[in-house]
Amino acid sequence: MHSNIESCGRSGGRGILAAFVLIAASTVDAGAAEFRWSEFLGPFHNVILHYPVGFVTMACLLELFAWRSMSDDIRRVIQFTLWLTIGSTILAAALGFARAADGGYNEQTLDAHKIYGIAVIVLAGVAIPMARIALKEGASPALRWGYRMLLLTTFSIMGLTGHKGGDLTHGAGYLTKHAPPVLRELLGEAEKPRPVVENAAQAKAGAAEPLTQADAGGAKPDLFTTVIWPAFEGKCVKCHGADKHKGDYRLDTREFALTPGESEKKPIVPGKPDESHLMALVSLTEEDEDVMPPSGKEPLTAAEKEALRRWILEGAPYSAVSESSK
């Protein structure tokens, strides 16, 4: 039975590694072919990434279960689980690279996500031979504790990998935006100031410099502050913001919002909603594949669409956002 478990672990690891090689080979650009493997395989990253999280969690739980008495069977199952962690993490990384190939992500957050993912592979790889020694009967307590700390570190780094992945997919602070203020401070993700109203002169000039409420002359919240920005923030910026800009388009500042993305069509033409590509996209039916937000996401309400049209007619003025929120 022991040899079977180890054999399954190695075979499973080799199988996933083979899949990684095939995927890596298939993502090579096939000249001018319209079909792209990276676009097809990339979304499966969101499916596979759950496996390494489950495997490393299982390894930690098994270690807790056998805290007092570690049998040979449990030791081998833990090693098998760590092999699966390595293999599934490599496969998830390969699919992640395929997904990232299309761009549209914050490079700093993406690099951190990659580094943490690779760190999980390395740490789990070190934990396997260490487990062979540390979990044997008669091993020194210091060695066992060292192995357990390594396992805990692997679990923690896996959590950080998921955190950065959440930021890439759902926008910055996805996992921590509702966390206690103290925890957000520790993570360097304190709540960012919300936009304040810009004055009329700045709106006409299209400026985007930071303002204070006093600079705005104590004006009452305008259409952008009360309707447009909350709609953008809740339904658009997570995919078209600083951390993720799908289609090479962003809505987090006025300058970006008026700049064409991959479509090369003018997204917002101040004063002309019927010539604004953004207005056309949000007005499509939910069945249309080009509708924004895309099918499956919460669409803009009729009131929000009407407000968007009025806001563009008014010149699409943006309330200023402080530098700390960019």
Image (tube, rainbow, N blue to C red):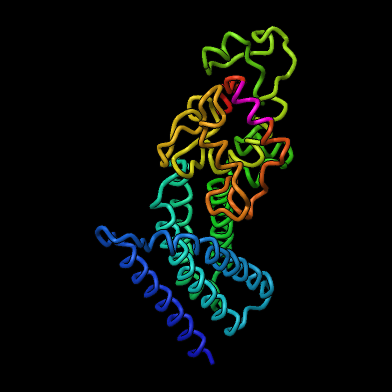
Is 266 in the magenta? no
Q: Examine the rendering and report whether any part of residue 142 can be seen.
A: no
- Numbered circles on residues, count: 0
Is 312 in the magenta? yes
Residue 9 position, x and y percent, is 48, 80
Identify the residue at horizontal 41%, vertical 78% (top origin): 15
Identify the residue at horizontal 54%, vertical 33% (top origin): 251
Nearer to me, 53 or 59: 53
Q: Which residues are magenta?
A: 307-313
Direction bottom: furthest residue: 1
Residue 305 position, x and y percent, is 67, 36
The dominant secondary structure in magenta is: helix
Nearer to me, 52 or 297: 297
State the quadrant of the C terminus.
top right
Direction left: furthest residue: 31
Direction front: furthest residue: 274
State the quadrant of the N terminus.
bottom right
On screen, residue 12 above or below 186 = below
Q: Examine the rendering and report whether any part of residue 213 can be seen.
A: yes
On screen, residue 3 above or below 64 = below
Residue 152 position, x and y percent, is 59, 59
Q: Left or right? Give the position of 52 relative to 212.
A: left
Nearer to me, 156 or 292: 292
Residue 70 position, x and y percent, is 62, 78
